[in-house]
C-alpha cells in the first residue's frame, strides 16, 4: 500500500517493531537514558542549541503549548495567514484570549514579507507573530527566512508551526531566530501519531516568565525541570518514544542534507508527474512544498470518487482538500519514509484512475 497523505506517514519496520516493545518505567534510569539521547539527537535535526521538549499529544497540542507558554490574555498577536493550518494557530490564540490581528493572503499565494513589515510598523503593540512554515492545506512552503528577518527587525516573538516540514525541509531554527517551533511525530519523523516536539529559545523563555495564559499540562517550565531528571511531567507516549529513538538513528545516518535533497527530488518528481498527466498545481509553484503537493481537481471529476478508486483498486491513499478546498483539490503527501520510486507508482496509479472517473 502507498499511504501518501500528509500524515500519518508510513513507518519503517524498525519504527513499528520498536512500538511493540514491552513498557518500561518512565521514572526509571532506562527511560532517562532514552529521553536524553532522543533530545540530544532532536536538537541536531532542529538545528538548535536551545531547549527541545517532547509533549504527548498530536501536533496541535504543541501549537497550543507555543501560545500558552509565551503569551498573556489581551496580548496583541499577528497571524500571518494563507491556509487552513495558519487559521487553526490563530484560533488557538483567540481561544486563550489573545487579540489576534490577521494579515491574510489568498490560499495558495505566498506571504508578502513587505506587508508583514508594514503591519508590524502600524501596530507597534504586537507582541508575537504566528506563522506556518509549510502549509499542508495548500502544498506551500512559506519563505520563513524572509518573514523571520522582518519579524526580528521589530524584535517580536516568532512562533512557528513547522509540523509538516521539520525533519524534511531545511529549517535552521537558531539561524532564523525562531522562538518556538512545533512539529509532530506522524509527519516527517516516521513515527505513529502521539508526540509533539517543540523547541524553545532564550527569548521564548523570557516571554514565558511573564506570560499569564492558563497552563498546566503544557507548561514548558515543568517540562524543563523534569527533563533534567530524564523524565516528562506526565506519563509520555512511551511506545512513540521507542519508535522515535529508532527513526532518529535512521535520519542521522542518512544525514540532514541528504534528507532535504531527497525531499526536494521527490517533490519535484511529484509536481512534474502531476503536470505531465494533464493536471495542474493548486499553489504558486515558486513556493511549492517538498512534503505535500496540492493538485486541482479537474472539471467533471469527483474528487472523493477518485480518492476512493485509488484506494480500492490501486492501493494508493491520498487526501482531499480541507474546508473551502474540499472537493477542489487533492493532496499528495511525500514526507518521511518516501522515495522517488514510491512517487512514480503513486503518479502511475493517478494517471490510470483519472480517466475512469471523468
Ligand atoms: C498535521 C498538521 C497540523 C495538525 O497536527 P495534528 O497532529 O493533527 O494535531 C498542524 N499544522 C500543520 C502544518 C500540519 O501539517
Image: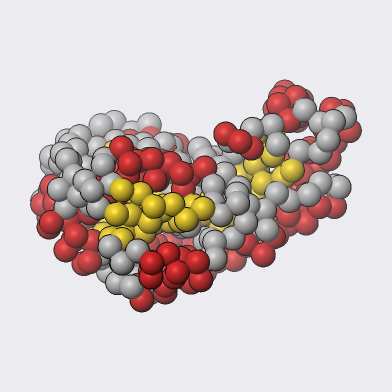
**Residue sitting at x 25%, y 32%:** 23
Is 317 on the left or on the right of 176, as rendered?
Answer: right
Is 111 on the left or on the right of 247, as rendered?
Answer: right
**Residue sitting at x 70%, y 49%:** 282
Q: Quadrant of the C terminus?
A: top right
Instruction: Tell me if residue 1 can be seen.
Output: no
Front one among 37 and 173: 173
Instruction: Tell me if residue 86 can be seen.
Output: yes
Q: Count every numbered label the image shows and give the total.
A: 0
- Which percent across, then down, holds residue 206? 16, 63
Q: Quadrant of the N terminus?
A: top right
- Which percent across, then down, holds residue 305? 75, 24
**Residue sitting at x 73%, y 51%:** 281
- Which percent across, then down, holds residue 95? 30, 37
Q: Is residue 131 above or below residue 195?
A: below
Front one among 100 and 83: 100
- Which percent across, then down, holds residue 230? 15, 50
Res 42 → quadrant: bottom left
Q: Is residue 350 above or below residue 150?
A: above
Quadrant of ligand 1: it is: top left
Q: Is residue 146 above or below residue 352?
A: below
Front one among 352 and 73: 73
Front one among 37 and 292: 292
Is 125 on the left or on the right of 87, as rendered?
Answer: left
Outermost residue, front direction? 122
**Residue sitting at x 38%, y 31%:** 20
Amino acid at each position: 500500500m502507498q499511504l501518501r497523505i500528509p500524515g500519518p506517514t508510513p513507518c519503517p519496520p524498525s519504527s513499528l517493531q520498536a512500538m511493540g516493545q514491552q513498557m518500561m518505567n518512565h521514572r526509571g534510569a532506562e527511560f532517562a537514558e532514552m529521553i536524553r539521547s532522543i533530545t540530544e539527537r532532536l536538537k541536531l535535526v532542529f538545528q538548535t542549541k536551545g531547549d527541545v521538549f517532547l509533549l504527548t499529544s498530536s501536533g496541535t497540542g504543541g501549537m497550543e503549548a507555543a501560545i500558552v507558554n509565551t503569551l498573556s490574555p489581551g496580548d496583541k498577536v499577528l497571524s500571518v495567514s494563507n491556509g487552513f493550518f495558519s487559521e487553526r494557530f490563530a484560533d488557538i490564540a483567540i481561544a486563550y484570549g489573545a487579540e489576534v490581528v490577521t494579515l491574510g493572503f489568498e490560499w495558495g499565494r505566498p506571504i508578502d514579507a513587505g506587508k508583514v513589515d508594514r503591519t508590524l510598523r502600524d501596530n507597534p503593540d504586537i507582541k508575537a507573530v504566528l506563522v506556518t512554515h509549510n502549509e499542508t492545506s495548500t502544498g506551500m512552503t512559506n519563505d520563513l527566512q524572509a518573514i523571520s528577518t522582518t519579524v526580528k527587525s521589530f524584535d517580536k516573538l516568532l512562533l512557528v508551526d513547522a509540523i509538516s516540514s521539520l525533519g524534511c525541509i531545511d529549517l535552521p531554527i537558531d539561524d532564523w531566530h525562531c522562538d518556538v517551533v512545533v512539529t509532530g511525530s506522524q509527519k516527517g519523523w516516521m513515527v505513529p501519531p502521539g508526540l509533539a516536539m517543540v523547541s524553545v529559545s532564550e527569548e521564548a523563555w523570557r516571554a514565558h516568565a511573564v506570560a499569564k495564559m492558563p497552563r498546566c499540562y503544557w507548561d514548558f517550565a515543568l517540562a524543563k525541570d523534569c527533563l533534567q531528571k530524564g523524565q516528562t511531567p506526565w506519563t509520555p507516549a512511551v511506545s512513540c518514544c521507542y519508535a522515535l529513538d529508532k527513526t532518529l538513528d535512521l535520519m542521522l545516518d542518512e544525514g540532514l542534507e541528504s534528507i532535504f535533497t531527497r525531499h526536494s527530488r521527490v517533490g519535484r518528481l511529484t509536481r512534474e508527474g502531476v503536470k505531465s498527466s494533464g493536471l495542474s498545481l493548486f499553489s504558486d509553484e515558486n513556493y511549492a512544498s517538498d512534503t505535500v503537493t496540492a493538485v486541482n481537481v479537474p472539471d467533471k471529476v469527483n474528487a472523493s470518487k477518485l480518492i476512493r478508486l485509488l484506494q480500492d483498486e490501486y492501493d494508493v491513499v491520498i487526501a482531499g482538500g480541507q474546508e473551502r478546498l474540499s472537493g477542489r483539490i487533492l493532496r499528495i503527501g511525500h514526507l518521511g519514509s518516501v522515495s522517488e520510486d514510491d512517487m512514480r507508482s503513486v503518479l502511475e496509479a493517478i494517471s490510470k484512475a483519472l480517466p475512469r472517473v471523468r
